[in-house]
Structures are given as structure tokens and as C-alpha cells.
Amino acid sequence: MMDRVRLGVIGCGSLGKLHVNLNFNRKDIMSADLHPFAEKLEVRGLVDIDLAKAEALRETFGGAYATDDPERLFADDKMDAVLITTWHDTHAPLSLRALASGKHVLVEKPMVMTEKECDDVVEAVERTGLKYMVAFRSRFGKGAKDVKREIPHPDNVITHARTHGIWREGMWAQDPIKGGGQILSQGCHIVDLMFFLAGAEPESVYAVGGVYHHSRPDVMDTLNAAIRFNNGSVGALIAGDGGAGRLMNHPKLAYQFPFFVMVIDKGRSALVMDHGHDARFESCVPESEWTPPYDVADYTHDLGSEAASGMADILPTFTRCILNDETPPATARDGARTTRFIRKCFESAITGKIVTF
Ligand SMILES: NC(=O)c1ccc[n+]([C@@H]2O[C@H](COP(=O)([O-])OP(=O)(O)OC[C@H]3O[C@@H](n4cnc5c(N)ncnc54)[C@H](O)[C@@H]3O)[C@@H](O)[C@H]2O)c1
């Protein structure tokens, strides 16, 4: 029986470093029940195609070796699991190699780039029975969990995934091959939150959109979609960059992102804001039927940006899932649903047709 998890980090850039640092150094913003699992993690190998980055992370967090070759991790029989924090086009091939080598996988979002990769990764996870978790941070936020508990079956889900600022043209995430653009790269967080709160699968989508403020004609930057879910509920998604700014925010919000998901269920409504961190509730039904846990004006916790979405809980939750043989809170099927949905939105916007799932 395993009593600890030996981890390899593939991709020692910002997020590789952030996850490991939060695990070891930020118990102050981690859920208390996860503290024992943070201690059961051991960094064993560090990989980056830029070897200096792997070596720098090893100097800070230890580990048996740093390398520029992920195959060294896959061949290491003392390695239990890998964290994949690389550019998006490498998520699927690295996931498939890790699973084929018997390693559990925690992957940063988006899980994969294409619909074919969705199928391949889900198939490999289900065939191997290994743990596979996607780091969709918004699900881990307190506000998201409160709304999911209070309004589990909304009949309407309205999602605003439009961020402020215009993403830099030259950055890797805007590249159609390496990143897929802002909607896939960042919008995927809120699309996942939308499905988490809807508690349903997509049935059909009709989207309009295009390129409005970027130079590349092949990376859509604006998308408005109407969605039908398979439980009969309906929703709307507004996604893209270059807008909204802080108009949507309250100055007390910790994370200051203008993302939100509003859920409505026959007079009960809630707004999940700030990357899942915070929520507001409103009731139009008698108190005898439902009392919201807190009010529209309450901002419940003010912990700073990393705490804002339960980010520090992600790696110890993955460790717990491995050691306790639990299903991860965001699975390969969740990751696949999100990428597939965004791809189908693009398809609908390009063809002008309703696309079914
Ligand atoms: N959850 C969040 O809020 C959040 C925020 C930013 C980025 N991310 C995600 O984290 C991941 C990494 O983004 P980042 O901002 O850390 O990027 P980054 O560029 O800082 O780091 C990525 C690292 O991966 C390395 N790399 C690329 N291909 C590799 C390969 N095949 N093998 C080994 N190393 C490889 C690069 O050299 C780089 O050091 C992405 O999936 C991104 O979407 C998540």
C-alpha cells in the first residue's frame, strides 16, 4: 500500500513552480483536511525542454534529478505520478506516454487541444484505471462549491467568460498550434465551471463569433453561444478577450477577473464570481422554501489571489485521490467535455449551423 506519492514535474515554468510551491509553502491558504496529503508528496524528477528551468526548480524543491527528456521520468519505476504544466499541444502526447508508463497524471488546463485527443485520453485513462485529474481551479473555489450545493439543478446557466485586456499576439497561448487562443486557453476554466454547475451534458449549441481584435484570422477571439443541456435546461456563454474590464467586479473581490456563472432555478439564483472564489445568492421564493446561505452583499473571504480559487488545494487533492483511491474532482471526461464543447462552438460559428453532441 502506498503511503506517499513521488512526483515528476513536466514543464517547470510559471505553473509548475506555482503548484509545487503552494503544496509545500502555502498551508495558510490550503484546506486544513489536505495538509496531511501535502506532506505525503515528494518531488522526484523535474523536466523542462529548457534544462535550466528544471534545474532551478530542483534547487528550490529538491528531487533526484533534473532533465530535458520526459522519457527519463516515464522510465523511472520509482516515479508514481506526473504533473504536466507545459504548452497545450504537448498535453495529450505527454498524458498518453505517462499513462502508458503506469503514472497517474495531473494536467493543467485545457486537458487537450482537439476532439480526437479528447477520445484518446479518455480511452487511455479508462483502460489503465490510473488517476487522471485536470487542474480546473474554479471548481475548487468556495463560492462554486456553495452554489453547487444550494442550487444543484439549475434550469438556466448564464456564463460570462470574457476577460479584460487583449492577449498579446506573440504569446504561445495565442498560437493556434501551441495554445489554441484565449477562448480555449482561459475560457476553458469557466466553461468547465458552467458544466460543473449545470450538472448536465451539452446536447446542442449554436454560436456566433469571429476575429474582432486580433490579427490572425484563424484564432477566434469573440464567441456568443446558446446552449441546450441534456436535462432540458438551457444556457448562454459569452467568451473572448479584449473587453469587460473590471466593470463586472466589486473592489473587494480577491481575484479581480470578470468571469462569472449565474444559475437560476425557479426563483432561486446565484452568481459565482472571481474564479469560483466567491458567490452571491438571491431568493424570490418564500423563506419556508429556501434561505440562501448568505446575502447578495456578502463577500465572505478575502485571502489574496492564489487562495482565490482553491489553487493550493489542487496538488494535495491529487495526492489524496491516489493514496485513498478516490475519483478526482475533475476527470478526463470533464476535460474532454470542455475542449469538445469549445471546438463545437467554433464549428457552429464558422458553419452558421446548430451543432449537436
Ligand atoms: N490555472 C491557471 O490559472 C493557469 C494560469 C496560467 C497558465 N496555466 C496553464 O499552465 C500550463 C503552463 O503554462 P505556464 O504559464 O506555466 O507556461 P510557461 O511557458 O511559463 O511554462 C511552460 C514550460 O513548459 C516547458 N515545456 C514546453 N514543452 C515541453 C515539453 N514537451 N517537455 C517539457 N517541458 C516543456 C517550457 O519550456 C516552459 O518552461 C498551461 O497549460 C497553461 O494553460 C494555468
Image: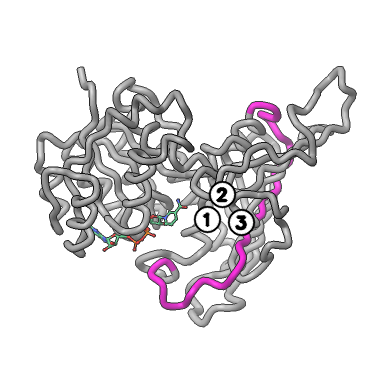
Compare marks 1 and 3 and give the one earlier in the sequence: 3
Indicate which disc residue 191 carries.
2
Residue 219 vs 142, above or below: the answer is: below
- Ligand 1: which quarter? bottom left
The secondary element bearing badge 1 is classed as: helix
As drawn, the residue found furthest toward the bottom would be: 215
User: In this rendering, which labeled residue sits more in front, label 2 or label 1?
Assistant: 2
Q: Mark 2 and mark 3 in contact (Cβ < 8 Å)? A: no
C-alpha distance separating marks 2 and 1: 8 Å
Q: How crowded is mark 3: few (under 14 residues within 10 Å), some or many (20 or more)?
A: many
Compare marks 3 and 2 and give the one earlier in the sequence: 2
| Number of numbered discs on residues | 3
Q: How crowded is mark 1: few (under 14 residues within 10 Å), some or many (20 or more)?
A: many
Q: Nearer the viewer, residue 90 or 217?
A: 90
Q: Mark 1 and mark 2 in contact (Cβ < 8 Å)? A: yes
**Amino acid at circle 3:** Phe
Magenta region includes residue 326? no
Query: What segment is highlighted magenta in the picture?
Result: 149-173
The secondary element bearing badge 2 is classed as: helix
Residue 351 vs 62, above or below: the answer is: below
C-alpha distance separating marks 3 and 2: 15 Å
The residue tagged 1 is 342
Q: Which of 168 and 153 is in front in this view?
A: 168
